[in-house]
Image (spheres, rainbow, N blue to C red):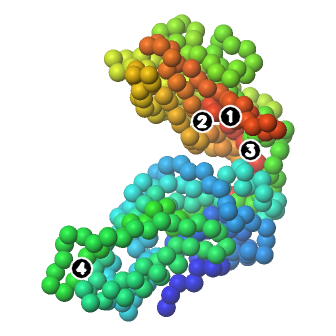
Amino acid sequence: MKLKLALILSLFLIGSPGRAQDWIRLSFPQASIIGAPAGKTEAEFIQADYTLKYEKNSVTDVSESTESMQEYQDDFRKFITSYFKGSKVTLQSVTGNKLQVKTLSQETIDKLENGVKYVYEGVTAQTLTLSLCAPKEDRNGLISIMSDIVKALHSDNLLQVPAILIDTLSRSTIDSVFYRMEIYEPGVYNKVRVIRIKQNGNICNCNWETNCFSYFVNYGTGGFPRADTLIAGSETKHATILAKPVFCGKDNKGLVYQLQVVRDDKGLHLWLLTSQGNKNNAMSRKLEVPFKDVMVKGKPVREWNLGKTFLYRYMSNDVIKNIFLEVVAKQITNDKLVILNWKEGKPGYSDIKLSTLKYPEFKAVFVK
């Protein structure tokens, strides 16, 4: 019997209950559920209630997951196996690549209903590879399986459609052909977190588009310049001043970030430093901003670009604050780079932020 994916999200809590924000491991993995409004909750399942307000085209933020890849592969196999029952096509193996956490973005949360429970985030793979075996004469069976899998990975209520590629493998037998199916962004989740939104939008006068962010500036700069220069080896201008996420109008002095440029025999490097998780608020390197070397007028120029990247989640009582980093920078001399903070938007639109520390917040509680 084929899986019915529309409304029932079966949940089975594995292990001890733990804290309210612990992952809920689904008894059966579910596709396209991030952003689903969770209605009546019973012992082993949550019924999604699409009569409640929800965002069909939910925007998600993506971060790396530290959960078990083997566990995810085993769970996905369980999710997909029923589609092969009664078919001559067999599933040989499931291989995942790069586990991710997909989380409802602040933009989406601001459109949701206060007081309602939503599936807030979940663990999924970036790509999945399925190895299939089919009889040479049963091409229709393979097409049928592919059609069923495509339907399983897509919900009419939440528009999350993966890309699928299938080709033959070099290995075959007298009567069988082996295939490889690549599924990009499968959107199948084996673990989720659910929240009840208490207040979204502009709480504590902290809005992610107007004043809930910081630019990166150095000690010799005032205000919010369009661009700011860092100089490797300079005593004061090798790093930006400390950026402090604001929590309901107050700095959290124990949590700060800054960008620092250094030079080695391979050229300039741009690092994010932070006190996050360090004893006595000591600063340490968290990540290097990725770069590429391009040719400009016949000369190599290094450029840095880091899209919206999750850094940290801060929770205090019923306030959830996610901290993100974005960076765009360009080398201007052997020892200097310029951080591009913003550029002007089209007439009538706000400026476009390029390099920022963003820290939106909303009020919600994690629920089981």
Label 3: which residue? 361
Query: Closer to the camera, 293 or 264?
Result: 293
Q: In screen coordinates, is 227 left or right of 299?
A: right
Q: Which numbered circle lies on residue 90?
A: none
Mark 1: few/some/many CA within 10 Å (<14, 14-19, 20+): some
Task: Please report contact status of discs 2 and 3: CB closer than 8 Å, yes or no.
Answer: no
What amino acid is at disc 4?
Answer: Val
Vertical comparison of 2 with 228: above or below: below
What amino acid is at disc 1?
Answer: Lys
Q: Residue drawn 31% across and 82% down?
A: 90
Q: In screen coordinates, is 342 left or right of 96?
A: right
In three-dimensional space, the C-alpha distance between marks 1 and 4, rounded to whole angstroms, equals: 52 Å
What amino acid is at disc 2?
Answer: Glu
Element assignment for label 3: strand
In three-dimensional space, the C-alpha distance between marks 2 and 1, rounded to whole angstroms, equals: 9 Å
Q: Position of residue 180 (x, y in %)?
A: 32, 70
In three-dimensional space, the C-alpha distance between marks 2 and 3, rounded to whole angstroms, equals: 17 Å
Q: Earlier in the sequence, mark 3 or mark 4?
A: 4
Label 4: which residue? 177
Element assignment for label 1: strand
Label 2: which residue? 326
Residue 131 quadrant: bottom left
